[in-house]
Image (tube, coloured by chain):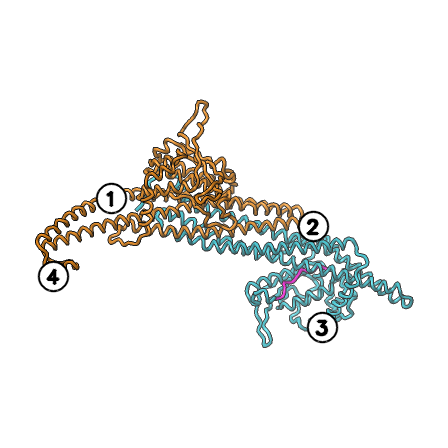
Amino acid sequence: MRVASSADSSSNNSRSQMIMADSGSSDEVAVICNTDITSKESENNLINTMVERGTALLKKMEISVAEADKRTGKNTVNMQETYTVYLIETRPAESVSEEGTPAAPDTLWRRYSEFELLRTYLLVAYPYIIVPPLPEKRAEFVWHKLSADNLDPDFVERRRVGLENFLLRLASHPVLSNDNIFFLFLTEEKGWREAVLETGFQDKADSRLKSLSAMFRVKNPDKRFTALKQYSEDLSTVISQLLRIRARVADRLYGVYKVHANYGRVFSEWSAIEKEMGDGLQSAGHHMDTYAASIDDILEEEEHYADQLKEYLFYTEAVRSVCRKHELIQYELEMAAQDLSYKKQQKEELETGTVRIFSLKGMTSKLFGQETQEQRESKVAALEQSIQEGEEALKEKNAESQEFVEKAWNDIERFKEQKEKDLREALISYAIMQISMCKKGIQVWSNAKECFNKM
Amino acid sequence: MSGATVPADISGHMLDLDEDEDLEVFSKNTSLADGNPMPNSPDSMVNQFRLDEENEEEQQGAINKDIFVTVDNPESHISAIETFITYRVVTRTTCSEFDSSEYEVRRRYQDFLWLKSRLEENYPTLIIHPLPEKFVMKSMVERFNDDFIETRRKALHRFLNRIAEHPILSCSHHFKVFLTEEELAPHRKLGPGFLSRMSDTMRAMANSVRGLRSKLEEFAVMQEYVDDFSNKMCSVDKVTHRIIKEHREYMDELKQYGPTYFQWAESEELLAEPLKGVGSCVERCSKETEEQIQHLSEFLVPTLHEYVLCADTLKAVMRRRDNIQAEFEAKNEALASRTTDKEMLQEEVDDLADRVEQANNALRGDWSRWRTSMRADLKSAFISTAAKNVDYYEKNTYKRDRGGSFDLNLNLNRGWMRYMTS
C-alpha cells in the first residue's frame, strides 16, 4: 500500500526530472543497481517502509499534507496577521468508487500552531515516548542565498513536506497512532482545540516544564539512560556542527558556479571581435552560462538532505526529555524510599528510646525530660500510619518507574532502529545527489571542451 | 647585423650607431642581400604548432626552426653589491650561422630585458612575445620565492622559443649574441643605450602630438581590434583569478566539512561505515579541488597573463608604426614648403617613405602570424582547462560511487530489518 503523496505532483519539478547522464563506467553501475533513483524516490521508499510496518491507523487511511495556503486573520492581541495553513487530506485506504477512480479525500486546514499544540499534548500524555519532532519553526542553518523568510515559497514547501512527514511518523508509531486526539486532529476541523484542552493536559504540561528545568541529583542513575542522554547530547552537537559547515560549503560552491557566468558574458563579447575563433567561443560561453545556472537546482536538492539531518537533530531533544523524565521518576522514587526509611528509623528510636538521629525535639526531650508513655505511643501510632502510607507510595512509585522504564526502553529500541535506517538512507541519497552533480559537471565541461576544440 | 645588408632591420636607418659593424662575420641573412624586405612570406611560415614546453621538440611542419632553446636551472648569485638569480640558457642548433651546435650560457633577467629592447629597436613593428614582468613590490611575492622563480623561468623559456621560431627575429644578431656569448656585459655596454632610448621616446611623444594625416583602413581596424582584445583579455584574466579564489574558499570549507563526518562516526556503530564513507569522499573532493586550482594556476593563468601583456605589446607596435608614418608625413610636409635644398630633403623623404612601407609590411606579415599563434595558445589553454574539469568530476564520481556502493549493497538486504543494537 502506497501512501498517496501529492508532494510528487505538485512539488519542485527538478526532483522528479533529475536526469542521470550515463558516465559509461558500467562496472560501477553494475554494483550500484539503484544509482538512478532520485532522492525523492528514496524519501518515498522511506515513507513506504513506515507504511509497511503497518499500524492499524495506516491500514485504515491514507494521510497527506497536500497544499499550503495563506490566510489573514486577527491574532490573540487582535492584530492582523498573515499566516500559512496546510491542507490535511485523509482518505480511506484503497478506496475506489464505482467508476474506478479514487474517492475524494476528506480535508481540513491546520496551521503550524495547531501542530505544535498536538505535539505538546502528546509529549505530556506519553512521557515515555520519543515523540517525533516538527519541522523547524524558523529557517536555521541557512546559506546566504536561501531565504530565511517564513513566507518564502521554498520554505513553505519544505515545511509542508516536513509536516506530512511528522503526521506519517505519528501514524506509523505503534503507540501514538492509537491516540484519539491525534485521530481527531486528522478528522475534526472544528472543536479539536476544545477537545485537547478538555483532556486537562495543560496542568500536566506546566508541571512537566517545571520538572524539566529543575535541578536535582539522582543517587543511583540508570547507566543505560545516562549513556543514552550522553549520546543524544553528542549527536546534537555533531549534527549542528555538520549543518553549519554544510551551509558554508553550499555557499562557497554557489560562488564557484556563479562566477563562471562571467566567462559566459566575456566569451560572448570576445567572440564578436574574432573571426575564426568566434563560433567556438560563443558556444563555449553558453555552456558556461548553463554550468552557472545548474547550481540552483543542485542546492535546492541538497536542502532535502539538510532537512533529514535536522529532523534527527530535533529528535535528540525528544530523547533527552525522555531521559530527563526518567531521572525525575528515579529521583522521586529515591526520595520516597529515603522518606520511608527515615520514618522507620524514627519509629525504631521512639520504641527503643535511643536517639540515633539527631533532632531538636529529641534533644529537648532529653534535656527537659522524657515524654509520657501516652505521648510516645500516640506518636508511634501516627508514624506507623505514615509508614504504611509511605510503603504504599513507594510501591506505587516503584511500579510507575518500572512501567516507565519498560515502555521507554521499548520505544528507545524502536527509535534506534528507525534512526539507523533513516540516516543510512539519507547518506545514500546524499551520495546519489553528489554523483548526479558530478555527472552534470562532466557533461557541461565535455561540451565546453568540444566548443574550444572548434576555436 | 649590418644595416646595409638587412633592409628589414630598420635600426640601421634610424640610428647611425651600429655596434655590429665589427661583427659582420656573423651576418646571417644572405637571402636578404637582394634588398627584398620580406625574405619569406610570413603566411608560408605559419605553423600550427603550439609552443608547449613539453612538445617544443615536435616541429612537424616547422620550416625554419633550427634553434632549440631551454631555460632552466635558476641559481642565486650573491655578490658584494647585489643578489640576483641567473638562469641557464642552453641552445642546440643546426643553423649554419652558428659556429657550434651547442651553447650554454647563464643569463639574468636584465639580460633578457636588454635583448627585448634591442629587438624592439631593430624591428619596431614586429610583434615580440612579452617578457614576464619585473618584480613588483606590492604583489607581496618574495622575489626569491620558488613559485615566482619557476613561473618566471617558464615565461623566459617561452619568450626565447618564440623568438627562435620567428622567421625574422630568429636571425637577429642580438639574439645570437644573447645565446652564444659567455659574457653579455661588453655587448650591453656598446651600442644604443639609455640615451638613444630616450630620444626614441621623445620623438614618439613629439609625433603623437602631431597626429596622423591619414591612416590606412586596415590599420584603423587593427587598432580597434587591439583595444577590444586588450579589454577582453583583461576581463578573462580577472574572471579566472576570481574563479581560483572561489575554488580556494570552497576547498577551505571542505577541509572542515570532512572531519565532522569522521567525528560523528565515532559515536555511532552501524552508521560509522557510511559516515566514514561520506567523510572520505569529501576529503577526496577537497584534494581534487586543490589539484584543479593547481592546474589553473599552472596552465591557464600564465597563458592569459601573457596575452594581457601581448595586448600591451600590440598597442606599442601600433604606436611605433604610427610614429614612423608621422615622421614621414612631417618631413614630407616640410619638403612641400621648401624651395631650396630640395634634393637632399627629397632623399630623406624617400627614405622615410620606404621605412613606412617596410614597417607596414612587417606588421601585416607578423599580424597574421601572431593571430594564429594566439588562437592556438588560447585554444589549447582552454581545452586543457575544460579537460581538467571533466577529469575532476570524473574522479569525484568514481570516488562517490566507490563510497556509495558499500551502503547500497547493504541496502539490498532490505528484508533484514532488525539491526543489532547494544
Camera-nearest label, 3 or 1: 1
> Which quadrant holds residue A354?
bottom left
| Mark 2, secondary structure of its residue | helix
| Residue bearing mark 1 | A400
Give the image location of residue A11, x and y in percent: 49, 38
Colour representing chain B? cyan
- The span shown in magenta is B126-135
Tell me how far mark 3 sits from mark 1, CA to CA.
107 Å
Mark 3: amino acid: Leu
User: Which chain is home to disc 1?
Assistant: A
Chain letter of disc 3 in the image: B
C-alpha span from label 1 to label 4: 45 Å
Reading the image, the residue beneath label 3 is B190
Crowding at dot 2, Cα within 10 Å, few <14 / some 14-19 / many 20+, comes out as some
Q: Residue at x 74, y 62 (%)?
A: B124
Query: What element does badge 3 sit on?
Result: loop
Q: Which residue is mark 4?
A: A368
Q: State which mark lies toward you, 3 or 4.
A: 4
Q: Give the orange chain's letter.
A: A
